Amino acid sequence: MFGRLSAEFRDRTKAFASAVIRLFVKLPGDREEVRVLGRQLLRSGTSVAAQVREASRARSAAEFCSKLEGATQEADESQLWLELLRDDCGIHDPALTAVLTEAGELIAIFVTMVTNTKGKAL
């Protein structure tokens, strides 16, 4: 196993997925645009934790980086759906703000981990 991800970090990304699920459940179901964006958010937000789980079982530095880069893409996509829900659909929920902030923090962590791993491989 190549990945050096602590149980605490895996739990953090699982908590992010759980927060996305809780936010999705609270979204109003009577507006089509909110339903569509919410489903997109649900898919990308839960995928972050799945990618991190896969990275923790990576067999090489390249596989580890690939999985974390996938998690970065999913977290960035989640940010987009959250911003659209907030800015264009008028969803102003403290939970949305918290999930948006956490997505940004996770992206920064993923980028740092990939950069450091690639730097060690050189």
Image (cartoon, rainbow, N blue to C red):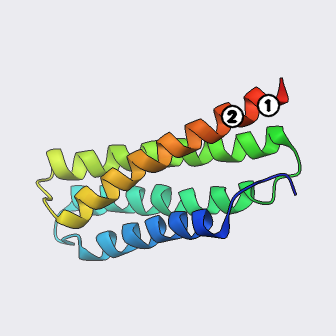
* Drawn side of residue 37 relative to residue 119, left or right: left
Residue 20 is at least partly visible in this image? yes
Q: How far across and down, in percent of the image, does residue 41 sit?
A: 39, 57
Q: How far across and down, in percent of the image, does residue 31 sit?
A: 17, 63
Q: Quick check: 88 above or below 57?
A: above
Give the residue at x 58% y 49%. Answer: 71
In the structure shown, which secondary structural element does the residue marked by tag 2 occupy?
helix
Q: Which residue is mark 1?
A: 120
Give the residue at x 18% y 71%. Answer: 28
Residue 110 image-quadrant placement = top right
* Drawn side of residue 103 relative to residue 115, left or right: left
* Drawn side of residue 98 relative to residue 16, left or right: left
Q: Amino acid at mark 2?
A: Asn
Residue 88 is at least partly visible in this image? no
In the structure shown, which secondary structural element does the residue marked by tag 1 occupy?
helix
**Quadrant housing the N terminus:** bottom right
Check if mark 1's residue and mark 2's residue have beta carbons within 8 Å.
Answer: yes
Comparing 97 with 73, the one in front is 97
Q: Quick check: 70 above or below 121?
A: below
Comparing 48 with 13, the one in front is 13
**Quadrant housing the C terminus:** top right
Mark 2 neighbour class, 10 Å CA radius: few under 14, some 14 to 19, many 20 or more: few
Q: Which residue is mark 2?
A: 116
Q: Quick check: 12 above or below 78?
A: below
